Amino acid sequence: MNKKRKIDSYVDFFINEEIKNNIREIIKPIFDTIYNELNIYIWVICFYNIFLVFIILANLFLILKLSNKLSTVTYLEK
């Protein structure tokens, strides 16, 4: 019973539009600061993933090329 009243009080607290706006105004600078601090790391991770995809594709291309050369060599030996 007591838990139900607590939940109802929390819900009533967030129903008020002015309180929601005040909380958003308080939290917005915190999220902006966190985003600004993590922004460079997000870009580094994105560039790393793009570079990694290119490296994997280049390795796949080289393996296919090598496999093709090896298969032609074995056919010539027979």
Image (spheres, rainbow, N blue to C red):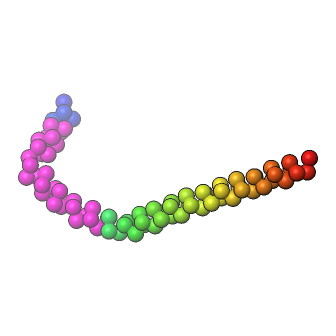
Left or right position of 71 against 14: right
Image vertical order of residue 52 relative to residue 78, above or below: below
Quarter occupied by residue 37: bottom left
> Which residue is at the front of the view, 49 or 2?
49
Residue 12 placement (x, y as % from top left): 11, 41
Residue 49 inside the magenta-drawn segment: no
* Residue at 27% in and 65% down: 32
Residue 2 seen in this snapshot: no
Residue 39 seen in this snapshot: yes
Instruction: State the extent of the magenta-drawn residues as a range.
Output: 6-33
Residue 73 placement (x, y as % from top left): 85, 53
> Which residue is at the front of the view, 2 or 62?
62
Image vertical order of residue 36 relative to residue 16, above or below: below
Q: Residue farthest to the right?
A: 78
* Residue at 19% in and 30% down: 1
* Residue at 54% in and 64% down: 51
Quarter occupied by residue 4: top left
**Magenta highlight: main SS:** helix
Quarter occupied by residue 41: bottom left
> Which residue is at the front of the view, 19 or 68?
68
* Residue at 18% in and 39% down: 6
Q: How many marks?
A: 0
